[in-house]
Every structure is written in C-alpha cells, then in structure tokens.
Image (cartoon, coloured by chain):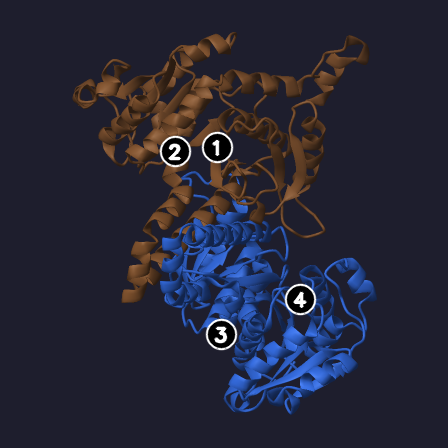
Chain colours: A blue, B brown
Amino acid sequence: MTAGSDHNHQAKQAVILSVDAMGGDQGPAAVIAGCNKSASKNPEIRFILHGPREELEPLVNRRKHLRERCEIRDAQGVVTMEDKPSHVVRHGKGTSMWSALDAVRNGEATVAVSCGNTGALMALSMIRLRKLPGVNRPAIAILWPSRNPQGFNVMLDVGADIRADEQDLLQYALMGTSYARNGMNLPRPRVGLLNVGTEEHKGRSELKEAYELISAQAGPAEFDFVGFVEGGDIPGDICDVIVTDGFTGNVAIKTGEGTASLIGDLLKEAFRYSPMSRIAALLALTSLRRLQKRIDPRTVNGGVFLGLNGTVVKSHGSADATGVSAAVKLAFQLAHSGFTDKLASRLAAATAPATPDPEAGGPDQREAGK
Amino acid sequence: MTAGSDHNHQAKQAVILSVDAMGGDQGPAAVIAGCNKSASKNPEIRFILHGPREELEPLVNRRKHLRERCEIRDAQGVVTMEDKPSHVVRHGKGTSMWSALDAVRNGEATVAVSCGNTGALMALSMIRLRKLPGVNRPAIAILWPSRNPQGFNVMLDVGADIRADEQDLLQYALMGTSYARNGMNLPRPRVGLLNVGTEEHKGRSELKEAYELISAQAGPAEFDFVGFVEGGDIPGDICDVIVTDGFTGNVAIKTGEGTASLIGDLLKEAFRYSPMSRIAALLALTSLRRLQKRIDPRTVNGGVFLGLNGTVVKSHGSADATGVSAAVKLAFQLAHSGFTDKLASRLAAATAPATPDPEAGGPDQREAGK
C-alpha cells in the first residue's frame, strides 16, 4: 500500500492503476482501447498492464497516449469465464489477474481493474489482498441509475456473499458511505437499509439489529440514516446508499436490469412498428441517445470490491472500450482520493471509540462491542 | 365453497364474484365503474358488492350492465390503508372487507376482489378463509411483464411472508403452476427457482433442498422444472413461474417497478427536451401507447392470494376503473376455471402419492413424507 500521508501532494503526482488486460469477452484490444481513452482525457493516469507481453506490446505501441505511461508486466496465464474460483485460487499464479492483484498487494498501485470472471476475481482478491482488519464479509458495491441529482445510487452487497448478519450490514453501511463520499463526491451520504414494505417486520431479526447499529454509527461516521427503505427506493431519491445482503442485492439488480432491457427492446419494437413511428424514432434520436446514455450500464461500469487491503474495480466481462474507460475513470477517482486508506481508517474508527477516552472505559467497550 | 363437480356445466352458468367496494384510494365509484366495464364485456359475471348500501345503491343504479346482475350487501365499516392488520383482525367485523371474504367463506362465491389495505386483507383472509390443508404459508402471486408469448410471468411469493423453507417453496411451485394453468391457460408451465448467479451455492440450504423437492414433483404435478434462475429471468422467457421467498420477491418486484417508472419518466423528459423531440413524441404516440399498455401495471392488476380455502384477488389500492376491471377479469377467469378446487386437489395430491398403491406401502410413505 502507498502511504496515505499527503494526498494533496500525491494528487499532483501520477496515479497508478493496475489493470488486468485479459479475461474480458472482447479481449485485450478493448481493454487497451479503454485505457487509452482514459489516458487521453487525464494526464495523471499511469498504468501497469498485466498479460502476455507479446500480445499487449503491439496493441500499446499503436496508442500514443499509452506508450509512455504504461508498464507492461508479462503474465502468460489467463483466467477464463469458465474457470472455477476454487481452481483459480489454487492454480492461478502466473495469470494476469493474479499479477494485477499482486501489484496492489505490493503497494505499486492502490486500485486494480479487471473485466475477468467475477467469482474468481473475488476469491483471488480475498486471498491475495486479504480482508481489512475487522471486516468479516467484503462486499461488491454497484452504482444504480436513480432520481438523485448525482444520477446514481450506491448499492451493496450485490453478490460477494449470500449472507450478511447485522455486523456485516453495519460494515456495508460504512463502506458504502465511504465509497459514495470518495467515488461520487457526496460529503454526507444518506443510507437506507433494504426491507419489505409490511408494517410487521417479524422475522429477519438481523435487520432490526442492524437498524440499531447503523443508527448509532450515523453520527460518528458522518452520514444520515434514513432507516428502512424498499426496493422502489433503489432507483429513488430518498437515500444515496442502499444496504442489503448479497442474495437480495443480486436478485434486485438483475431484476432491474432485466426489466430495463425488456423495456428497451419493446421501445425499439414500438419505433419499428409503423412508417410514422420510424420517422418519429429518427426525429427523437438525439433525445433517445441521451436517455440511453443516462441508463447505459457501460457509463457506470464497475462493481467495486470493498473491505479488502486495496480496492478492486470489476468491469463487466462484455465491456467494450467505453465500458473499460468508465471502470478506469472510477478506479482513478478512488485511487486519487486515497479511498483505500480512508476506508480502512473509517472501519477502524467504527470498531473503536472515535476519541479514545480512558475514563469512559473505552478499551473495555471496544472489547465488548465486537 | 361451491361444489367443483361439474365445471362444464358451471361454465355456462353465472360466475359470482364477491367484491369489496370500499378501501381503494379512488373510492367505490372507481370500483363500481370497473365492475360495470367487466360486466358489459362478459354476460356471465354476477357480483355481490360489499359496502354501505346508501353509498353503493345510487352508483350501481346508474349502470345499466350492473343493476340486474349485482347484489348489494350492506356493510357500514371500512378498512382504511392506515389500519393495522392486527386491529382489523380483532375489530374488523362489519367492514366491507370482512363481508366480502365471508361471502367466499359461505360458499356464495369462490373468488373475492378487494382494492383495500394488503396487510389487513391478508390477515383477514387467513382467519376467515383459513389455510388449505397442508399449506404452511399462503403466498401472494403477481404477473410480471416478460418476453414469453403470454406476455407475463407468474412470480410468488411477493410478500405474504418474509420467510419460506423448502416445503413452502415446493408449495409455491405447485400453487404457481396451478395459477398459470388456470389464470393464463398454460397447460404445462415451466418453473424456475430464484437464486443468485454464482457457481457455489453455499449457504441457503433451503434452496438446494427445495430444488430436490420441486424436481421430484415436476412429473406428477405436470410442470417442467428448469432449475435455478436469476433475477434477470423474472422478465425473461426461460420459465413461466418464478418461485422465491416473500422477502426477496417483494424487493425484486419493487426494484423492477421503480426502475421501469424511472425509465418512463426519463423517456418523457427526453421527448420534452427539444421542439424536434416533441414532434417525434406526437408521431410516435400510438406506438408509445401500445408499449405503455404492454407494461402498464393497471392491465395486469391483481396480486392473488394462494393457499387459502378460496381465492382472493388484491387489486392495487390506487386502481381506477381500468385497473379494477383487470382485477375482476382475472377473478372471473379463476372462478370460471374452478381454480380454487383444482388448486386444493393439486396440493392434496402432492402430499399423498398420486396413485395410492397399498403394496408400495403408500400410506406409510405419506406419513413419513411430511
């Protein structure tokens, strides 16, 4: 890990990202095109690119923005979408994914980016980067189109783990607010805890307990807790961060994505229906493109793995240059803001009293509190 | 309950629906307008309408299709949206909701329709109609716009109970297929069990057990089991019935609804953006209306309570005449097909061997199997 001592100074220096060039559906050319796109817009970005040198070198050399700002680290192995996470953990040494994570592990970069196999990336991140002290379950956070001014809400966990107890949900709240603060520039994020809309919340006792824990941390951790929210609030504007377990979160986002995609297809169908509607589609092209851009998953490409010693941005496997560039932009912002270190100290502060006060029996509380 | 002995004969007779005229946001006028709409299209429908006679009588008398085919049953009390279910269970006697359910309890109708408070309606349905033998948790099933030829998939449970064990999930599969068969005319529904898209299904052991139970029942209960499905398959075309617990189901549909509503609003905004796009909107009006109709919740209005001695169709609280008419149409189809009785025998058959075979030790298995 790089020292987080002087971010103001650091901000003027280069920000180094560790990028796994392999494993995406569109191959290394799309990844390198995406990196080039980001590099051309942002003079501070530097890359360590991982993959077979003989494949990457010609692709990089064709890109003038990349050539000087990119180090290629040879890794001959590739993790495929079919590889089982357990297999990758045992035999993945020498792959570009392993190498990309190790550059973060060694402190050469604070954020890694990969388009590869999510399960393998999570499993490998866990063993190479290890969990932050006090974190039981790392989480995957995504951005979801919303009615909020920032255009997106943070939701976590969306599938790192299918279970979460009240302590995990509290940590998700802390990780999600830190992410919203550093990745989306929201100084005081509003957090909601996902539940169902019935009056009686019988069962699911962990939600009631998490409610109390998150309430208690809202003050010290400088966020607002809006309490229980429903599925309809994920794209809504009453909170910025939605906290849930990975099973519910995963089902919710996939239902939302599937429904959005169905509507998109029906819309296209509607515009093809008659000569009149075809003319209409032409006239509305600019407006429709703007709408598509707003809800295009490529422009918010990147699930972020939180709770590890280092941050990993998981880009969609099918990401093209635009998608990769969006993931790289997010990774840059997180690296630039010193997110990894800030998150670590935020989580450390939450497990200990904010201002240790020996007279108040702080250390004892600390023992008892966990 | 009416005898389900001769459905062919019954089909040519009147089908009586028990309708709670009160409790919706738009008042009894919208409910009666909806009933009238259905009555004008369908000569077989008869209604028992529940509510204050002095309010309902003038509204009914204005409607020529209703006057002759509608019995008003005076009930002065009204369950409001704010009433707690527990309060309604204790003090709800004399309300139109209670009266509507009692007409089903007494066998005057097999299906009840209400726009009222969902929690109260479920609680009251449980105590007035009681659970079917062998059913542990009744479920709420909804229709969700999908890529399937029938245009919709069935999903359950979407919030009757926040928990479901493997036996409950099996019953949901049986209830869902019976509903798809009788409510949507699908002779052999395909069932999917909702899960997350990771390879390792560690934890959530009830899902693995439900998988085995549902597999085993697919043959005797005449449905196809497609195995685990993901959130994206809820609006998809690989299955017709999606089985899940009420917590996950509730979050999923609300996320989907919220996302669809956000896209709709962004689309409207896009069409207002420039003079050109406003002209486009005018030209595309017919196509857009057709799209809206396809995904309009009003046209598939009605969650259905399954697993009770009688069927209850819950219409949206905000339903207008079109919405109420859609719920009435669904209630008619379910009543007409003898759904309540068919579901009861389907569930009874699943808990006993399909063809009792004394030599195979059937009765013993039956004891052990539950």
Q: Where is residue A30 in the image (x, y as percent from the top left)?
A: 64, 74
Using residue A34 as the reference point, say whether residue A75 is left or right of it: right
Tell me how far mark 3 sits from mark 4, CA to CA: 20 Å
Label 1 Cα neighbours within 10 Å, binned few <14 / some 14-19 / many ≥20: many
Q: Disc 1 marks which amino acid?
A: Ile
Q: Residue B118 carries which label?
A: 2
Q: In which quarter of the image is the C terminus of chain B?
A: top right
Mark 3 lies on residue: A182
Q: Residue B140 carries which label?
A: 1
Mark 4 lies on residue: A131
Asked where in the image residue A135 lies, by quadrant, the reply is: bottom right
Label 3 Cα neighbours within 10 Å, binned few <14 / some 14-19 / many ≥20: many
Q: Disc 3 marks which amino acid?
A: Asn
Using residue B42 as the reference point, say whether residue A209 is left or right of it: right
Label 3 residue SS:
helix
Residue at 65% of width from left, 92% of height from top? A68
Residue lying at the far front in this picture: please name it. Answer: A275
Label 4 Cα neighbours within 10 Å, binned few <14 / some 14-19 / many ≥20: some
Q: Quadrant of the N terminus of chain B?
A: top left
Residue at 68% of width from left, 17% of height from top? B352
Q: Are marks 3 and 4 on the same chain?
A: yes
Tell me how far mark 3 sits from mark 1, CA to CA: 41 Å
Q: Can residue A104 be seen in this view?
A: yes
Q: Where is residue B221 in the image (x, y as percent from the top left)?
A: 65, 24
Label 1: chain? B
Label 2 residue SS:
helix
Tell me how far mark 3 sits from mark 2, CA to CA: 41 Å
